[in-house]
Image: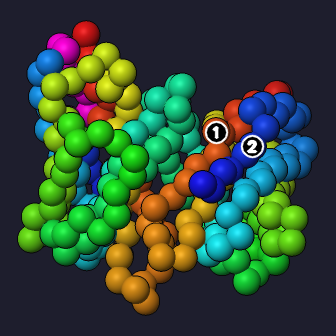
Amino acid sequence: GEDVEQSLFLSVREGDSSVINCTYTDSSSTYLYWYKQEPGAGLQLLTYIFSNMDMKQDQRLTVLLNKKDKHLSLRIADTQTGDSAIYFCAETESGSARQLTFGSGTQLTVLP
Amino acid sequence: KAGVTQTPRYLIKTRGQQVTLSCSPISGHRSVSWYQQTPGQGLQFLFEYFSETQRNKGNFPGRFSGRQFSNSRSEMNVSTLELGDSALYLCASSPGGSTAGNEQFFGPGTRLTVL
C-alpha cells in the first residue's frame, strides 16, 4: 500500500526559513497536499500541488515536487512563532481522489 | 462562506455504547469524508460519501458506518465502542465532482473519549 513519511521534529529561529520534507511511495499519486494542525484544532489546508507540476508558490509558502524521487517539500519563508504547529503531508491517488493518505506529521517549533 | 461544522465537539462514552457524530460540509460541497486521528495510528481514512452514496471506504471494522443526507450533511456511527475508538474524528468537505477541485477542507473535529 501507499506510504507517506516525514521527519517528526523541526526547530528553527524566528525569521529563518523552514523546510519540511516528505517522501511517498505511490507512483500514481495525483495530488499532494500540505496541511497545518494547531493544538486542539482540525486541519488547515495550506496548499497543494498536482503531480505534473514541479513547484508552486503561494506567498510565504513554496512547494517543490521531485516526482522521480517521490519527494515533496514545503518551504516557509520568514518563519514566525505563529507557524509553530504540526505539518502533515498527504497524497491521493488517481481513482480515489478524496482518500487522503497522510504522513505522521512534522512538529515545527519556532524559537524566538 | 461558513466552514465545515462538526457536532458535538466533545463526547464521552463508555465501552459497549454507540455514538453518532455529525458533519455539515461547506455550502455547495457534495463530498464528505471522515478520518480518525489517534496518537498511535495517525490520520486514517474511514469513508467518503458523495450524493448520498458511499464512494470509498478505508480499512475499518463494520462497527464504523456512515450516511449522507440529501442536503450533503453526513453522520458517522460507531457501535459497540471500544477503548481504542478514543480519537479525534475529522470530517472533510470538498466539491466532489470529477472536474471539481480536489481541495479538502476539514472541520474542527469531534473528540471522542471512551471510558
Quadrant into which the N terminus of chain B falls: bottom left
What separation in Å lies between label 1 and label 2 (alpha carbons)? 6 Å
**Label annotation for residue A6:** 2
Q: Is residue A72 left or right of residue A86?
A: right
Residues A9 and A78: in front is A9
Q: Residue at x 12, y 28 (%)?
A: B18
Question: Mark 1 = which residue?
Answer: A104
Q: Amino acid at mark 2?
A: Gln
Tell me whether the residue at label 1 lies in contact with that at label 2, contact meaning CB atoms closer than 8 angstroms. yes
Image height of A4 relative to B1, above or below: above
A3 in the magenta segment: no
Mark 1, secondary structure of its residue: loop
* Left or right side of B74 for A112: right
Q: Which residues are magenta?
A: B8-15
Instruction: Judge by depth and name the residue closer to the eye, A1 or B31.
Output: A1
Disc 1 marks a residue whose amino acid type is Ser
Q: Do we see residue B109 in this rendering?
A: no
Q: Label 1: chain?
A: A
For marks 1 and 2 on the same chain, the one whose residue lies earlier in the sequence:
2
Which image quadrant is residue B105 in?
bottom left
Q: Is residue B11 magenta?
A: yes
Q: Position of residue A53 (x, y in %)?
A: 76, 81
Question: Residue A77 in the image: x percent, y percent?
Answer: 83, 55
Residue found at x 32% / y 26%: B85
Along the line of sight, which residue is nearer the eye, B61 or B66?
B61
Q: Is residue B69 above or below residue A108?
A: below
